[in-house]
Amino acid sequence: GGSPPALTRSRSADDLSPARAVAHQMERAMKLPTSQDECVQHTISVDTVRRLSLGEFKDLYDHVMVIDCRFDFEYEGGHLMGNDHMSVHHMPPDKVDQMEALLRLNDREGLEIDNHRLCIVFHCEFSKHRGPAMMQHVRTKDREVNEHRYPLLYYPELYVMNGGYKGFYSNLTTRPLCSPMGYIPMASKHYRELCQRHMRTRVIGKKSRARHLKHSHSDSESPNSPI
């Protein structure tokens, strides 16, 4: 539900001095309260996501995108509802190309887009592997296409929802924001064959590892065990 915002043009960062470029990037610093566990940086609580969905941060953001990185059967069993403040996109690990297309990260014609008022939140079941891996893939690709204007990024604000969908569904305050109001674990015995089929794709891990070997600029947000 909900529609992603139109990407708008902004002035080219090529005209900025290095000092101005860094200052410009600093202006786009993370605005939400974050925490860090042993594997993942820039995590936000399920309650913060609830508040985002209710438009409580509309003074900071024009739109919020939630990227659900779980497998099909998990998503169909229950997911976050989209609304006017927040769009929800299903992007499992084998949809990495669609993820890049959604964010127009394959545009190499010099399009300058200004998304400092766009917040993107990734999650999977527990937000330990698939969600953080997709977030890191987006950040790595963003660094790659913006290498000529480092340290600027198209998408400076990327977050992971701490606890994942399980945490969101288990919280009685946030559960009503799920549709349908259900939860199917990845390890459900009823979907074992489907799960094994999905696990064989491992698209994100392969592409991300290849890019990390190729490019020297990488952020410290990489999970220890990408899918």
Image (tube, grey):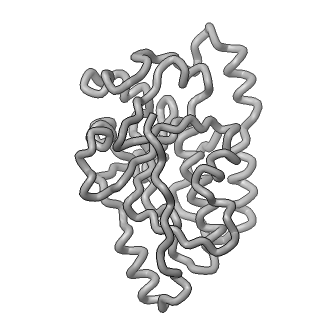
- Kindly identify the residue that appears in the image at 35 percent across and 73 percent down: 27
Q: Tell me the quarter of the image containing the C terminus.
A: top right
Q: Could you say which is closer to the camera, residue 223 or residue 72?
A: 72
In the picture, the quarter occupied by the N terminus is: top left
Q: x, y percentage for residue 217?
A: 61, 70
Measuring 42% from the left and 87% from the top, which residue is drawn there?
20
Tell how many labels.
0
Q: Position of residue 85 (x, y in %)?
A: 34, 43
Question: As drawn, is 207 to the left or to the right of 46?
Answer: right
Residue name at image x 47 percent, y 31 percent: 126
210 left or right, relative to 85: right
Left or right of 221 in this view: 83: left
Q: Is residue 52 above or below residue 169?
A: below
Q: Is residue 218 above or below residue 69?
A: below
Q: Residue at x 74, y 66 (%)?
A: 214
Query: Is 168 or 62 nearer to us in this picture?
Result: 62
Q: Position of residue 38 (x, y in %)?
A: 44, 46
Q: Nearer the viewer, residue 46 or 215?
A: 46
Percent x, y of residue 222? 56, 53
Q: Is residue 123 depicted above or below 10 in this figure?
A: above
